[in-house]
Amino acid sequence: MHELSIAMSIVDMAQEEAARRKVYIEAVHLELGALSGVVKEALLFSYEVACGGTPLEGSRLVVKEVPIEVYCPACQMPKTLKSMQLFCCPDCGTQTPEVIHGKELTITALELKQ
């Protein structure tokens, strides 16, 4: 389960930032792409485990799921895929290998305790 090592890295990064700013973290916000290879539920569980005994214990991991968005060469515009099994434009059926979004695993914000 690589989600635990990812969660531990998230906690480490958040702790470093909290120490640098001399603040407490209430929540860590994360964008998680459908193609990231990370299972959201496993990451949420792992985050709680990784926070145990740290200054982040009791904080939340807020995950925004990012759908797969590709560029359709025929329509010449971005399209959101309905399935990760079929990389074809949902409107015209053209194969769409250029991924614009969906690989994200990015910390986007930290909520600080008042």
Image (cartoon, rainbow, N blue to C red):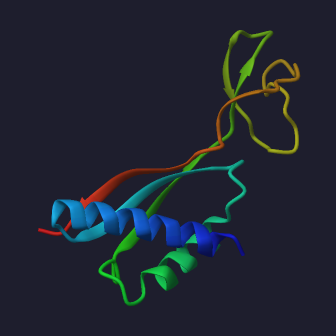
For the C terminus, the quadrant is bottom left
Image coordinates for residue 38, horizontal then vertical, percent: 67, 61
Please determine whether, in this image, residue 98 is positioned above or below residue 75.
below
Residue found 15% across the figure and 66% down from its top:
22
In the image, taking residue 80 as reference, residue 19 lies left or right, namely left
- The one nearer the camera, 37 or 14, is 14
Please determine whether, in this image, residue 102 is positioned above or below residue 64.
above
- The one nearer the camera, 27 or 14, is 14
Residue found 29% across the figure and 80% down from its top:
55
In the image, taking residue 52 as reference, residue 17 lies left or right, namely left
Image coordinates for residue 20, horizontal then vertical, percent: 22, 61
Occupied quadrant, residue 85: top right
- The one nearer the camera, 65 or 103, is 103
Residue found 56% across the figure and 78% down from its top:
46
Image coordinates for residue 33, horizontal then vertical, percent: 62, 48
- The one nearer the camera, 77 or 109, is 109
Residue extending furthest toward the bottom: 53
Number of callouts: 0
Residue extending furthest toward the left: 114
Please determine whether, in this image, residue 25 is positioned above or below residue 31.
below
In the image, taking residue 9 as reference, residue 52 lies left or right, namely left
Please determine whether, in this image, residue 73 is positioned above or below residue 48.
above
For the N terminus, the quadrant is bottom right
Occupied quadrant, residue 40: bottom right
Image coordinates for residue 89, horizontal then vertical, percent: 80, 24
Residue found 50% across the figure and 75% down from its top:
47
In the image, taking residue 14 as reference, residue 43 lies left or right, namely right
